[in-house]
């Protein structure tokens, strides 16, 4: 038993070393993603993304393929089409502890109408305590809501689907991600935000289709971001509808 435990720990340590030193996709669109999408004359909507690499669209090289670009296009093309002013204050590699700085940046200047927060993957891979990560997320949601911003949180995605991580480390990271997501859900709801469980709603698609990942097997591809965007759309559209009634 001792030998098995030592061997298992050595295997996990080796896989973690390999995973940390892989070459992953880098941001292609700069640190501040900004665009105006939709037809002139439509009701304007200020949409801001906060979080980690997914909030920037790491893994794709066209704005329309990022999750923000896809959400903006869906909102602009819908039956109640909006003119979407899209921006992102996300930073690749961010953890929940970094959200306070991003919230401050998001609230500079003209206040956004809707904020989408995508965070948790780096907390999970770093094996952070779920309660601690969720507390920082809850504080960020509360601060945005106090400023009059509608908030939608996409919880930690299904890291057990990431092909860049070898088993059994993949299963361990997936378990960590599920714990983070559960804590995030409670914290975001308590703070007045809306929640989309990305792992539950989109994880099976990512596990079944390797094309939902970009070349590094970790970050989403354009197809992967499209899957996330459609999962987030009902909650984001509902939040946008609230702002239009103000």
Image (tube, grey):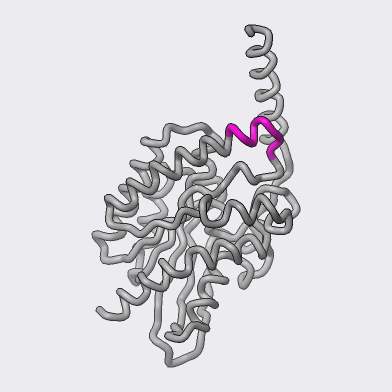
**Residue at 31% from the left image edge and 48% from the top image edge:** 139
Residue extent of the magenta highlight = 165-172
Res 10 quadrant in image? top right
**Residue at 53% from the left image edge and 50% from the top image edge:** 199
- Residue 4 x, y percent position in the rendering: 67, 12
Nearer-the-camera pick, 141 or 74: 74
**Residue at 49% from the left image edge and 82% from the top image edge:** 78
Nearer-the-camera pick, 4 or 96: 4
Taking 142 as reference, is 230 left or right?
right
User: In the orientation shown, which residue stands out farthest toward the bottom?
Assistant: 41
- Residue 91 x, y percent position in the rendering: 52, 52
Q: Number of numbered discs present?
A: 0
- Residue 40 x, y percent position in the rendering: 47, 91
Taking 227 as reference, is 42 left or right?
left
Position above or below: 178 against 3: below
Res 64 quadrant in image? bottom right
**Residue at 27% from the left image edge and 50% from the top image edge:** 190
Position above or below: 29 against 131: below
- 207 is within the stretch colored magenta: no
- Residue 124 x, y percent position in the rendering: 52, 38
Nearer-the-camera pick, 165 or 57: 165
Nearer-the-camera pick, 98 or 188: 188
Res 41 quadrant in image? bottom left
Q: The C terminus appears in which quarter of the rendering?
A: bottom left
């Amino acid at each position: 038993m001792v030998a098995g435990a030592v061997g298992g720990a050595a295997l996990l340590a080796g896989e973690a070393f390999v995973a940390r030193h892989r070459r992953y996709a880098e941001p292609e669109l700069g640190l501040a993603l900004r665009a105006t999408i939709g037809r002139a004359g439509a009701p304007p909507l200020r949409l801001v993304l906060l979080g980690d690499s997914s909030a920037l669209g790491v893994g794709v090289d066209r704005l329309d393929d990022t999750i923000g670009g896809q959400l903006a296009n869906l909102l602009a093309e819908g039956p109640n089409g909006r003119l979407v002013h899209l921006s992102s204050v996300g930073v690749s590699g961010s953890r929940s502890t970094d959200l306070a700085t991003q919230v401050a940046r998001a609230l500079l200047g003209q206040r956004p109408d809707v904020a989408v927060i995508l965070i948790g993957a780096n907390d999970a891979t770093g094996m952070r305590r779920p309660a601690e990560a969720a507390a920082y997320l809850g504080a960020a949601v509360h601060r945005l809501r106090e400023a009059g911003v509608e908030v939608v949180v996409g919880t930690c995605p299904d890291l057990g689907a990431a092909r860049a991580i070898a088993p059994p480390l993949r299963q361990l990271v997936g378990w960590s991600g599920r714990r983070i997501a559960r804590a995030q859900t409670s914290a975001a709801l308590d703070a007045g935000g809306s929640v989309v469980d990305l792992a539950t709603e989109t994880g099976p698609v990512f596990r079944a289709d390797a094309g939902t990942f970009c070349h590094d097997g970790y970050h989403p591809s354009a197809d992967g971001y499209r899957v996330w965007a459609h999962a987030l759309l009902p909650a984001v559209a509902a939040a946008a509808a609230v702002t239009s009634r103000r």
